Image (spheres, rainbow, N blue to C red):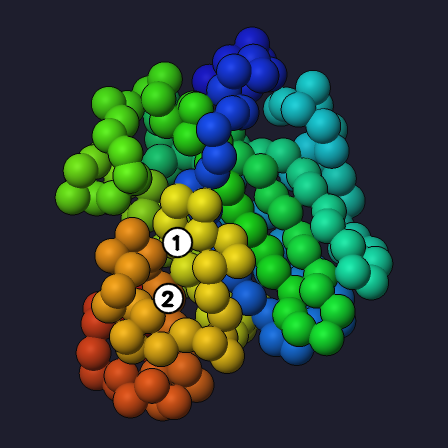
Amino acid sequence: MNYDFYNNPDHWMDGFYELSIEYHPYGDDKRVNEALVALEESRYFNGFWEEKKDFQKHSISLPITIEEESVKSFYGSLSLHNSTKEELPCLITIIRVNGESDWLDISIPQAAFDKVFPCRYPLTTKLNPWLEKINDVYVRLAESIYHKSPFDFAMIGEEISGETNQEEITIELMQNKPYMTCVLPSSLLDRLGLNGKGTALSNRLRLF
């Protein structure tokens, strides 16, 4: 991926395919910043650019300050299967919702998918087997982030940010939303009675 591809506004249209990670309760800058450090250290990620024009140049310095009731966005790129030949742009968004949770969203613009893969909508693995590559990277990112900064809930999917949260998630909700992939820590597994179910990941995380 070169500068022109990254900065082409046509490649940032039509929504996002996202990994959305919840930290509850809101207000713990340390947890969020440790998650950002884990992302920065990942072999799949490059960036923390303040603007798209900073592509492959000037990264921001961590930690960052997170204001009350705020949204902060930065830019980066994700390499699929640790390959620079398959690289996609991404947006990193930190959302603080007072009285609720902090969220870290890692979002790939769907328009960039259309330039690289044969897309069929809605974006599900059943219609788009290549999407397994994206989900695999997102799951690996979730694992590495959880290792450094344990989160309360994470989900993957098309325009998935805001779909649900650690308080509202239920087995029925997961079953009724086939487009949503969930990464559950042990506390949620206990609450939902899902220990031993799903696919085992590191640090007692499970994938559904």
Q: Do the residues labelled 2 and 1 touch (CB within 8 Å)?
A: yes
Which residue type carries mark 2? Val
Which residue type carries mark 1? Ile
- Would residue 38 be visible to someone looking at this image? no
Quadrant including the C terminus? bottom left
The residue indicated by pointer 2 is 183
- Would residue 139 be visible to someone looking at this image? yes
- Circle 2: is it few (<14), some (14-19), or many (20+) Cα within 10 Å? many
* Residue ID at (58%, 16%): 9
* Residue ID at (21%, 44%): 125
Percent coordinates x, y for residue 55 in the rendering: 63, 23
- Circle 1: is it few (<14), some (14-19), or many (20+) Cα within 10 Å? many
The residue indicated by pointer 1 is 156
* Residue ID at (77%, 44%): 61
Identify the element where label 1 is drawn.
strand
Percent coordinates x, y for residue 155 in the rendering: 41, 60
- N-term mark: 2 or 1: 1
- The one nearer the camera, 89 or 111, is 111
Question: In the rendered view, would you say 90 is above or below 65?
Answer: above
Question: In the rendered view, would you say 46 is above or below 86?
Answer: below
Identify the element where label 2 is drawn.
strand
* Residue ID at (26%, 64%): 176
Percent coordinates x, y for residue 184 in the rendering: 38, 73
Q: Which of the 4 image quadrants contains residue 129?
A: top left
